[in-house]
Image (cartoon, rainbow, N blue to C red):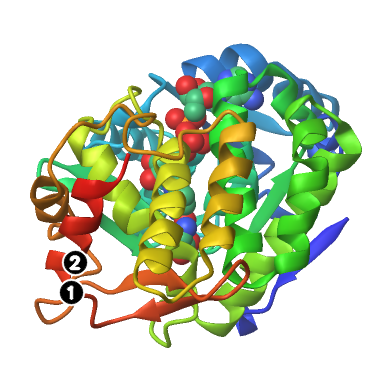
Amino acid sequence: MGVDVALGDRKYAIDIEAGALDRAGELLRPYVRRNHFVIVTDESVAQAQLGRLAASLDAAGIGHDVITLPAGESTKSWKNLEIVTDRLLELEIERSDNIVALGGGVIGDLTGFAASILKRGCGFVQVPTTLLAQVDSSVGGKTAINSRAGKNLIGSFHQPAYVLIDPTTLDTLPLREVRAGYAEVVKYGLIDSPEFFDWCEAHGPALLAGDSAAREYAIQRSVAAKAAIVADDERETSGRRALLNLGHTFGHALEAETGFSDRLLHGEAVAAGMALAFGFSAAQGLCPADDAVRVRAHLEAAGLPATLAAAGVNASGATLVAHMMHDKKMAGGRLPFLLARGIGHTFLAKDVDLAAVAAFLDGAD
Ligand code: NAD
Ligand code: GLY
């Protein structure tokens, strides 16, 4: 299965295929320069999946060096950016080279950012190994590291040259991480596809249990949705790409309150954030209450947090709204929110009353 991201002279292909990692030597061949790749990965992925990639490159006679970083969100730091760029320069990377990002969103975001600034921009390919990265972060060219002031505040738009998705890499991913990625799958249904949300209700349990057909369909469907949005609004200027932030403003406040730590994974925060966005939309009379109930019930059935309590957050509405004010989407002192008129009918609201949001959160469970 394949999807193209139609971005003119920066267009690229996404291949989705069980076992693709074992064919990486062949699939990555068009992107190799000087018959050598540098692979950036993290310690957990190196243990679980690097051997497959290395064996396939070896079999194809393609040389490779590996830069291995610690696993976890704190890896997206200035310090690791310096480590990676220094090492890439030592390895004499050239602008026409494609650095390989093998890992989840952390490795993809950091490697993409390093590629975007190294020698004023070199290439990279994404080989995502988490469900979240396979359905969202590996596509679309948002790259970033975190800073003291917040998450993803230092970054760039830099599209990969190619994305190779092997759903079987999820076999070694802990279930909690699979669930967190599943929140981003559900997101595509909630944004503009009620029938895909129906599919999630019917097939989500099989996907979470490791069913390969369900997994591949969800990845293909999600990537196709994201590719279409990115092709239409690459830099989030028209508002269409902003729809991908459904659940992220509420979720960002929850992540900030839990210290951007593994107390609450990004996808878990997005799950609770989407339930809260639907709850708030219903409370404002914008969305049928039944839809908000359905969204919450599905996320809970998937083992995801859908309430403040389940997200481990016990803060006032005012505190949570204060976190939201640090969101990078603030524009002219106002914070745009993704709200819903129903399942599959998300819209960007630019005039939300923050006092109403705080009051809603004070009353939410
Ligand atoms: P992650 O990269 O930290 O991966 C989660 C954990 O799973 C890590 O410990 C990793 O080592 C491990 N892991 C990864 N693949 C594995 C495998 N196949 N087997 C065993 N272990 C494996 O987290 P993530 O959820 O993939 O990504 C989260 C990051 O993505 C956040 O920093 C978020 O800001 C970013 N993000 C970016 C975009 C974008 O558009 N660029 C979109 C969404 C999220
Ligand atoms: N994950 C949001 C985006 O790529 O725009």
Where residue 211 sits, quadrant-wise, is top right
Q: Quadrant of the N terminus?
A: bottom right
Q: Give residue 238's position: percent from left, percent from top.
A: 43, 88
Residue name at image x 64 percent, y 50 percent: 185
Quadrant position of residue 90: top left
Quadrant of the image containing the C terminus:
top left
At horizontal 60% and vertical 62% (from top left) the residue drawn is 190
Give the secondary structure at mark 2.
helix
Residue type of the residue flagged with mark 1: Asp
Could you tell me if the residues under marks 1 and 2 are in contact, i.e. CB atoms within 8 Å?
A: yes
Report, in whole angstroms, how far the alpha carbon at label 1 lies from the one at label 2.
5 Å
Q: Is residue 335 above or below residue 138?
A: below
Q: Crowding at label 2, few (<14), some or many (≥20) Cα neighbours within 10 Å?
A: some
Is 344 displayed left or right of 306 in the figure?
Answer: right
What residue sits right under mark 2 in the picture? 356
Name the side, left or right, on which 52 lies relative to 80: right
Q: Residue 306's x, y, as percent?
A: 45, 40
Residue 49 position (above or below residue 236): above
Which residue is the extreme one toward the bottom?
Answer: 238
Give the number of the disc on residue 353. Answer: 1
Amino acid at circle 2: Ala
Residue 34 appears left or right of 216: left
Write down the quadrant of residue 235 in the picture: bottom left
Q: Secondary structure at mark 1?
A: loop
Is residue 96 visible to the viewer in this orientation of the structure?
yes
| Residue at 26% in and 33% down | 260
